[in-house]
Amino acid sequence: MTSSLLVLASSSAYRKELLSRLQLPFSVAVPDIDETPQPGETPSATALRLAREKAAAVAAKMPGAIVIGSDQVATLDDEQIGKPGNHANALAQLQKMRGREVIFHTALCVWDGRDGSHQLQNIQTVVRFRDLPDAELDAYLRIEQPYDCAGSAKNEALGIAILERIDSSDPTALTGLPLIALTGMLRNIGVTFFQNK
C-alpha cells in the first residue's frame, strides 16, 4: 500500500463491507452532494457524474488522499429506479420489475489526491427478477426491509431468492462497489495487495 490515505466516499454500509474485503486500511467520509439526476441525463451518465462528484467532494477536504466514489442507478425501460424509502414504494417497484430485466449501472471513481488525476468506469449488471405473486413480494419486503436499496432487493442476502439471473463482469457491482474494477484502478496508481503483515 502507498503511504497515502485510502478513503471511501460513502455512507453505505454495503460499500464499506465490500471494501474491507481487500484488507487495506481505509477511512470513511460522507460526501455532501446533490444526487438529483439532471434533466435529459442518461442513467449511466448520472451514475458516472455522481461517483465522480462524491470522490471530488471528499478529495477536496482530504488533500493527498486516494478517494473512492461510487454510485448506482437502476433502470427499467430507460426509466431510473431509485431507493424506495418505504414498504409501499418497494412493493410497487417489485411489482413493476417482476418477470423483467433491470439494468444496474454501478459507476466507480478513484481520485488520486497526490496529483488530482482520476479514473472513472461504469459496470453494467443485468438482473432478471422472478415473476412472483404479490404475497411473496410483500413477505420478502417485510422480512428484509430493503428500503435503502435501488431496486428494492438485497442480492447479497435473502433478496437473491426473488432474482432469476444476474449477468455481470463483476459480481460485486450489484451490491454497490465493483471490486474487480476497483482493484485494477488501485493497481494503476501503485496500490499493492497481498502485503505480509
Image: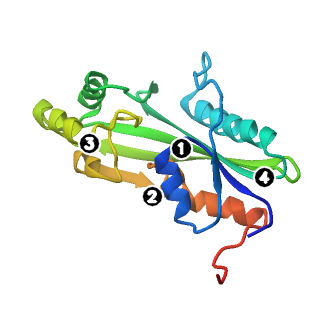
Do callouts 4 and 1 mark residues in contact (Cβ within 8 Å)?
Answer: no
Label 2 and label 1: CA atoms lie apart by 11 Å
Circle 4 residues within 10 Å: few <14, some 14–19, many ≥20? many
Identify which amino acid the numbered label 4 is placed on: Ala
Please give the residue where the numbered disc 2 appears in the rendered image. Answer: 171
Q: Quadrant of residue 48?
A: top right
Who comes first in sequence, dot 4 or dot 3? 4
- Please state the horizontal and vertical placement of residue 4, each as a whole percent of the image: 79, 60
- Please state the horizontal and vertical placement of residue 196, each as a whole percent of the image: 65, 84
The number of numbered badges drawn on the structure is 4
Q: Mark 1: which secondary structure? A: strand
Identify which amino acid the numbered label 3 is placed on: Glu
Please give the residue where the numbered disc 3 appears in the rendered image. Answer: 144
Who comes first in sequence, dot 2 or dot 1? 1
Q: Residue at x 65, y 58 (%)?
A: 26
Q: Residue at x 41, y 35 (%)?
A: 150
Q: Quadrant of residue 35?
A: top right
Please give the residue where the numbered disc 4 appears in the rendered image. Answer: 65
Residue sitting farthest toward the right: 115
Q: Mark 4: which secondary structure? A: loop
Please give the residue where the numbered disc 1 appears in the rendered image. Answer: 106
